[in-house]
Amino acid sequence: MNYMPGTASLIEDIDKKHLVLLRDGRTLIGFLRSIDQFGMYWL
């Protein structure tokens, strides 16, 4: 596996289930569907 810097390293995680813990205490569970060059994520 080759290392890709930045958001490109998230390509392997697309269509996998993720748990996101937010700073305000909320929890999101979902599938990573898309990312862009700015690091925006779509669950």
Image: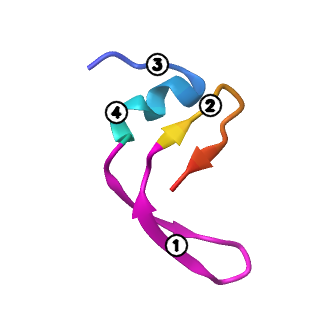
Residue 6 position within the rendered picture, expressed as x and y whole percent measured from the top left: 59, 26
Residue matched to label 2: 36
Up-down: is 16 above or below 13? below
Q: Which residues are magenta?
A: 15-33
Helix, strand or loop for disc 1: strand
Which kind of residue does numbered mark 4 sit on?
A: Glu
Residue at image point 51% right, 56% down? 43
Whether pointer 4 and pointer 2 mark residues with C-beta atoms closer than 8 Å, the reply is: no
Q: Real-space Cα distance between discs 3 and 4? A: 10 Å
Which kind of residue does numbered mark 3 sit on?
A: Met
Helix, strand or loop for disc 4: helix
Which kind of residue does numbered mark 1 sit on?
A: Leu
Which residue is at the far left?
A: 1
Q: Nearer the viewer, mark 1 or mark 3?
A: 1
Q: Real-space Cα distance between discs 1 and 2? A: 20 Å
Residue 38 position within the rendered picture, expressed as x and y whole percent measured from the top left: 72, 31
Residue at image point 38% right, 40% down? 14
Residue 35 position within the rendered picture, expressed as x and y whole percent measured from the top left: 56, 36
Residue matched to label 1: 28
Residue 5 position within the rendered picture, expressed as x and y whole percent measured from the top left: 54, 21
Residue at image point 66% right, 25% down? 37
Residue 4, label in figure: 3
Q: Real-space Cα distance between discs 1 and 3? A: 26 Å
Residue matched to label 4: 12
